[in-house]
Amino acid sequence: MPEIFSEGFFPNINLQDETNWATDFVQEVIIPRLPEVVAGHFSVELGTILVMLVCAGIFVAVVPLLPLVLVLAERKVAARFQNRTGPMRVGPWGTLQTLADGIKLIFKEDYIPPQGDKLLFLLAPYIIFACSFAVFAAIPFGQGILVSDFNIGIFYIMAISSVIVMGVIMAGWSSNSKWSLLGSLRSAAQIVSYEIPLGLSILTVVMLVESLGMKQIVASQDGGIFTWLIFRSPFTFIAFFIFFISSIAEVNRTPFDLPEAESEIVAGFHTEYSGMRFALFFIAEYANMFAVSAIGVTLFLGGWQGVLPGYDFLGGFPGFVIKTLGLVFLMMWLRWTLPRLRVDQLMNLCWKYFIPISFFNILGTGVWGLIFEKDDVWSIGISCVIIYVGLISAYAVAGRSLARKPEPQPSSV
């Protein structure tokens, strides 16, 4: 092997730590409780595989319940914004409505377009579903609640989430429908475009933490709210909003829901799907919402770290979930508030604004790191002052532009 790929060239790049939580669980918990006759012949490798299979089964059984809760929450949030009650008939206060809808989808007819590509048509929803849930393997929900502590965790998340666009294109192409094809091409262009500013925003975090591991990123934010990476420099503060808006575009949510624009292309890439396969697209969408919000909390909002140093207020697993659901609620709020963007507006926002600003953030983060080699009270205080002044200035400029009366237009008659 050439010397360029020797251990000294990539000293910190390993796929995973040497220790495995499943192996430790087998050696420390399972084997000591087995009878001596069985424990002497029990294979640690076999036990590791069994433990991981059981955890995977629990994961696959529990995580799909999350979209049921989020769908009901969105329907209630939309009803609140529109001054109505939302679903109220099934269960107390309509809490079982989404469960009834899921049962209905299971028993609906499974239609496959006769002129389409049957194999790709069947594979597409499973690819999107599998990739959406594979992202959760690298998200740390708490101090010890992590499936796999990859040293390149954020890189793994970016790689796996990028595969979703393949399933979208497969679904649109195999349906043999112009509406589905248009929706899939829109989604491909949108996801590929917004992955660039999203990845560049993540790079600002990696530059400050000097690690790709999700657990290490959260550990670097131990010390209260002002040590969260969103406040550590004015450039990461801007990067958070670019990340959040780009993630909304990644999951095709309003105002970036052009791939599913019902007023133009019926339902987009999943127009021809019905029954349980349509439900898989729906489950994947809400799982993606929760996943990108959880990634945003991990990278910028302290992860499982609490708000106050030394106290577990909004910390641990409950705090992580609360912060994540807060970002999910913000996505729902934006959906029922803003109108849909046009295609040219969507692409202009990405290529003319987000990408240049993201490169500026990377340059600024590098300069900030040279000026403040270590994060201390002075660096964080100066960062918070700059953020405060910037927000006041932005508010003043926005208020002045909104208060300006539009100039009268000449009549066309």
Image (tube, rainbow, N blue to C red):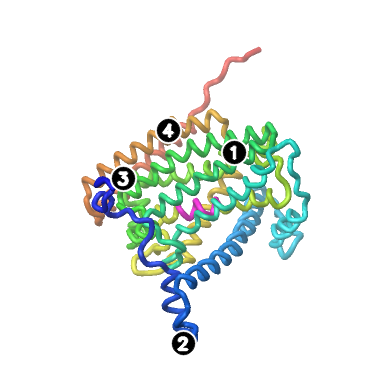
Which of discs 2 and 1 lies nearer the camera? The answer is: 2
Q: CA distance from mark 3 to mark 2?
A: 65 Å
Q: Which residue is mark 2?
A: 36
Residue 192 visible to an observer of this rendering: yes
Q: CA distance from mark 2 to mark 1?
A: 55 Å
Foreground residue, 64 or 149?
Answer: 149
Q: Which residue is mark 4?
A: 353
Q: Pointers 4 and 3 in contact (CB under 8 A)? A: no
Q: Which residue is mark 3?
A: 386
Q: Residues within 10 Å of mark 3 (few under 14, many from 20)?
A: some
Q: Position of residue 113 (x, y in %)?
A: 74, 40
Q: Main secondary structure of the magenta part?
A: helix
Q: Which residue is mark 1?
A: 169
Give whichever of discs 3 and 2 has the lower sequence position: 2
Q: Magenta stretch: give its range.
A: 288-295
Left or right, residue 197 beside residue 166: left
Q: CA distance from mark 1 to mark 3?
A: 43 Å
Kind of residue indicated by mark 2: Glu
Question: Circle 3 sits in a helix, a strand or a loop, which is it?
Answer: helix
Foreground residue, 351 or 379?
Answer: 351
- Answer with the quarter of the image where residue 241 lies: top left
Which of discs 1 and 3 lies nearer the camera? The answer is: 1
Kind of residue indicated by mark 1: Ile
Which of discs 3 and 2 lies nearer the camera? The answer is: 2
